[in-house]
Amino acid sequence: MPVPNTFASATSAIPLANLDTNFATPITLGNTAVQLGNTITTINSVTLVTPTINTITSGSGSNLVLQSNNAVTAVTIDTVQNVGVGVTPSAWGGYKAIQFANGVSLASYIGSSNPIAALNSGVYFNGSNNIYALSSNAVGAYYINQGVHSWQIGPPGTATANATLTQAMTLDVSGRLQLGTTSVISNGLLSIAPTSSQSGYTVQAGTNGNSVFTGLNTSASATFYVLGSGQIYSTSTSITAISDQTLKTNIKPLETGLSEINKLQPRRFDWKDGSATNVAGFISQEVETVLSDLVGPYKQSDELTVLGLRMGDMIPTMVKAIQELSAKVTDLEAKVGI
């Protein structure tokens, strides 16, 4: 015959003889009734002081649910060990995940020996496809796979529908960054892939004789490139600079011309760094004594500033010189009757 027992201040073990065969006899711990046996055990309003809990086990085929704040589900661990915080975890495939109610999740791929980590926003992987976790939100995912970092993006969609992600950026194990492509262009440290409507670029780490910056057209052909030595190569021979009259004021005739041109000293020289030899050009210090406004500081490095020369800005003075020569020729022709 079952015997009800009260252990409000028990100081010794409960004798099994005081319980029935199925342990269905209600017992009382303090003010709380506890049902032992084949039914669900519920303990309410019990304070455990410095308890030691080794294992909490759910029933076979059941999720383990932890509740807080008056039976509000806080954490759910499903039968394949995915964890949902404030949400029941989605049906992930190949990954173990911690998923939050706002659609954000942290996941680790367990399908192979490769260590893959993922940070997902609004999307999860069910083993075959990426699936929208929420509706009406753009989605994204970040993966680390054997040292390769990849960022994927996708448009808004409907919860539970398949999501198509596009790899927008990749950082490989060599530290090379690719935007809009998963391939390195011309061994570039930075590769920006061209599309049918957009041009692309690649930035390389090269020596003075190698291209360090290359522009690509929509067909992925190089349209210009810059060498480490500073030389620029282009499929076009023209550089367009802004020169609109409406943007200028204090317009007046140029005061330099043939006299200044005659004072310039064209030179040939070799660069000390070996980047080029027998180069035709000018010496900034020599030009500065004639056309000082064309010479200015050039920051060669963080530690060294030298003189630079705006050679293209010599053109107006050269044109003025040609005009002066032309006037002299015209005057001479008039004198000799030509």
Image (spheres, rainbow, N blue to C red):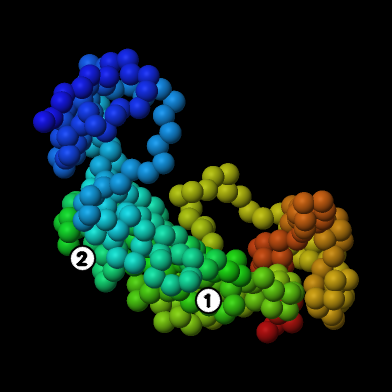
- Front-most of residues 108 and 201: 108
- Which residue position is annotated with label 1? 184
Res. 162 mark: 2
Residue 292 location (% of width, % of height): 79, 53
Q: Quadrant of the C terminus?
A: bottom right
* Closest to the observer, 298 or 120: 120
Residue neighbourhood size for the residue with mark 2, other residues' Cα within 10 Å, grouped as few (<14), some (14–19), many (≥20): some
Screen quadrant of the N terminus: top left
Residue type, label 1: Val
Q: Quadrant of residue 188?
A: bottom right
Report the residue at 67% width, 70% height from top. 205
Nearest the viewer among 170 and 272 is 170
Asked if residue 3 is positioned above or below residue 104 in the image, the reply reads: above
Amino acid type assigned to the residue bearing label 2 in the image: Asn
Question: Where 109 sits versus 61, above or below?
Answer: below
Residue sitting nearer the eye, 227 or 146: 146
- Residue 265 in the image: x percent, y percent? 86, 69
